[in-house]
């Protein structure tokens, strides 16, 4: 009898420790509006795997992509702030309606290439970090998109060719560009882009090559004009309360994984752009190279967009742009 009681006691202790171990582990859902095969989602999955390995499984991040949680892009600062989801991928310029400083990253025709985009984001990062903290969250890493071009049903080789376009845009700056060139912007969620093209609600889209592949633009569009209208970035943010609940060792592991992830995505984005454009071409999309004349005209016609933003933007935004222009020698 004593042996049986002792055995039961041992089992109880063992199962008790096991239950405590299970309870000690933390599980976060991570929100992404992008499809599973999009490079932003792939990066988020890779980040989750790095964190799980680095923490010995003590922190598990479950990525829910394709907008599965039902959250839209523009609301994501509030979503993370309120703890409705502990972690989310957020299009930076997409939440500029809640924090105007985030609009600076996609001022049209400010960055001419990915190298300049990286410089701009590095300069802006301390300002973005402070803004995120005010929204009860922490930026873990920033991930780039290739430059946004124009995808159309008709060939565009001049500003005049853009007049009358009905264009899906993903942020305020893109909408202002469409208006400046005589078109009509449509602020549609990504999930509605393909059907809107198929039904003729829109006839063009401002976006990057990965998104074009995700949406199979070759089924509904004919041309791609690589204009680098904007070069957008996403930020992966975590709710501060959730982050601070982690012990110091786990927090450091998360930050180390985030640093690795950020370097990796920036190093790979140029190759990704070439790969996705090539895939579009193979499926029937014709790339229409932009002439210097067109680029100069677009830079000129959008000058007021940049100037008007800087007049009304927070002082920090002007500091960012001034530091950026000095750094790139303009």
Image (cartoon, rainbow, N blue to C red):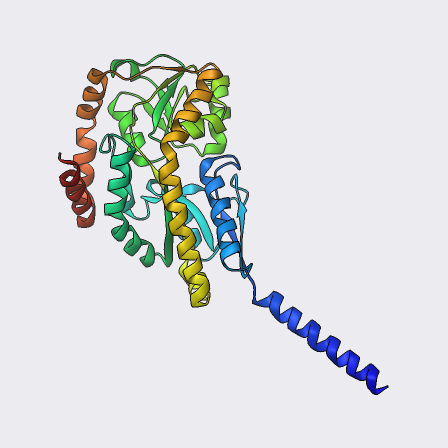
The residue positioned farthest toward the right in the image shown: 1
Q: Where is residue 57 in the image (x, y as percent from the top left)?
A: 56, 58
In the rendered view, tell whether residue 119 sits above or below residue 59. Answer: above
- Residue 84 x, y percent position in the rendering: 48, 55
Residue 81 visible: no
Q: Where is residue 161 in the image (x, y as percent from the top left)?
A: 29, 13
Quadrant of image for the C terminus: top left
| Residue 92 falls in image quadrant | top left
Q: Nearer the viewer, residue 54 or 206?
A: 54
Q: Is residue 10 above or below residue 239?
A: below
Frontmost residue, 158 versus 52:
52
For the residue pair 163 and 65, the one nearer the viewer reads as: 65
Farthest residue, direction bottom = 2
Residue displayed at 43% across by 16% down = 285
| Picture quadrant where residue 266 is located | top left
Indicate the position of residue 141 as horizontal and vertical percent values.
37, 49
Rendered residue at 46%/33% (across/down): 190
Say whether residue 89 is visible.
Answer: yes
Q: Where 25 falls versus 108 (above or below)?
A: below
84 left or right, relative to 101: right
The number of numbered badges drawn on the structure is: 0
| 4 shown above or below 75 | below
Question: Can you say which quadrant of the picture contains the N terminus?
Answer: bottom right
Residue drawn 51% across the image and 41% down it: 67
């Amino acid at each position: 009898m004593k042996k049986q009681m002792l055995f039961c006691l041992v089992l109880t202790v063992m199962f008790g420790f096991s239950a405590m171990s299970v309870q000690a582990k933390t599980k976060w859902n991570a929100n992404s509006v992008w499809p599973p095969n999009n490079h932003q989602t792939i990066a988020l999955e890779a980040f989750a795997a790095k964190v799980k390995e680095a923490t010995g499984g003590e922190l598990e991040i479950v990525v829910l992509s394709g907008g599965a949680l039902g959250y839209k892009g523009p609301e994501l600062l509030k979503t993370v702030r309120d703890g409705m989801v502990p972690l989310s991928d957020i299009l930076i310029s997409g939440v500029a309606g809640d924090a105007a400083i985030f609009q600076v990253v996609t001022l049209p025709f400010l960055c001419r290439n990915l190298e300049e985009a990286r410089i701009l984001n590095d300069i802006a990062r301390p300002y973005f970090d402070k803004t995120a903290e005010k929204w009860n969250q922490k930026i873990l890493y920033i991930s780039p998109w290739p430059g946004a071009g124009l995808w159309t049903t008709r060939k565009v080789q001049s500003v005049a060719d853009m007049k009358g376009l009905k264009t899906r845009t993903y942020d305020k700056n893109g909408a202002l560009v469409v208006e400046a060139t005589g078109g009509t912007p449509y602020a549609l969620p990504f999930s509605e882009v393909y059907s809107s093209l198929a039904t003729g609600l829109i006839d063009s889209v401002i976006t990057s090559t990965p998104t074009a592949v995700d949406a199979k633009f070759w089924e509904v569009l004919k041309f791609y004009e690589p204009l680098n209208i904007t070069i957008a970035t996403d930020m992966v943010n975590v709710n501060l309360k959730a982050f601070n609940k982690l012990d110091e060792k786990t927090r450091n592991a998360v930050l180390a994984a985030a640093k690795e992830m950020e370097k990796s995505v920036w190093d790979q984005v140029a190759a990704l752009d070439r790969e996705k454009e090539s895939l579009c071409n193979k499926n029937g999309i014709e790339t229409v190279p932009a002439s210097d004349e067109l680029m100069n005209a677009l830079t000129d016609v959008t000058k007021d967009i940049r100037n008007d933003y800087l007049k009304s933007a927070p002082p920090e935004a002007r500091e960012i742009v001034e530091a950026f222009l000095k750094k790139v020698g303009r």
